[in-house]
Image (tube, rainbow, N blue to C red):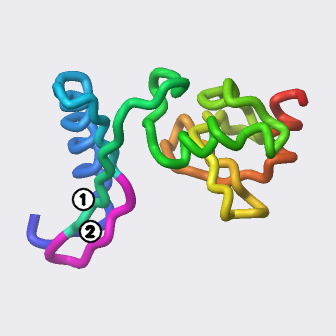
Amino acid sequence: MKIIKPSNIKIIRKELKVLLEKYNSENEHGLTLSLGDATYNEHSVTFKTTATIALEGIPQGIEPTPEAASFLQDAKFYGLQPSDLGREFVEGKNTYRIVGLKPKNRSLPIIAVDLQSERQYKFAAKDIQRVLGY
């Protein structure tokens, strides 16, 4: 690799996710490491990495991020239930999983991941209520 391009970053991210999953399942500290956004130029890439302790109530497969903790704490203020964290729903042609809440984002506070692309998207609470049948 002579220069770093977005296509290289996708490959690196996938490889790092595998390593982090192994670490998360084996470490003795009770920590979960998660990979965040990346910044890059043609010579380097920097990934934001977050270490969190296990949080009660977070379903398996959902990273214990601050956004997941916010969902557990504040879901009722948005007409949802804490147990909705991790629920899947279909919107359009895509299937999403609810992974968190950003209370500071008033118009689109609910965070969900597209299960096919693994990209995060933001949704209005009323749209999530509708697709979950509330």
The answer to which image quadrant residue 70 occupies is top right
Residue in the foreground of this view, choosing between 119 and 25: 25
Disc 1 to disc 2, C-alpha distance:
5 Å
Disc 1 secondary structure class: helix
Q: Quadrant of the N terminus?
A: bottom left
Q: Is residue 74 magenta?
A: no
Residue ID at (76%, 39%): 91
Q: Is residue 113 visible?
A: no
Q: Is residue 42 magenta?
A: yes
Q: Which residue is tagged 1?
A: 8
The answer to which image quadrant residue 93 occupies is top right
Query: Which numbered tag is attached to residue 63?
Result: none
Q: Do the residues under discs 1 and 2 have CB atoms within 8 angstroms?
A: yes
Does residue 123 lie above or below 79 as drawn?
Answer: below
Disc 2 secondary structure class: loop
Residue ID at (31%, 71%): 39
Q: Determine whether, in the image, residue 72 is placed left or right of residue 77.
A: left
Amino acid type, callout 2 = Lys
Query: Which numbered tag is attached to residue 5?
Result: 2
Residue ID at (54%, 41%): 69
Query: Residue 7 at x, y = what percent?
Result: 31, 59
Residue in the foreground of this view, choosing between 18 and 50: 50
Query: Residue 10 at x, y = what percent?
Result: 32, 53
Does residue 77 lie above or below 30 as drawn?
Answer: below
**Span colored in magenta:** 36-44
Query: Residue 116 at x, y = what percent?
Result: 53, 37
Residue in the foreground of this view, choosing between 65 and 46: 65
Query: Residue 86 at x, y = what percent?
Result: 60, 28
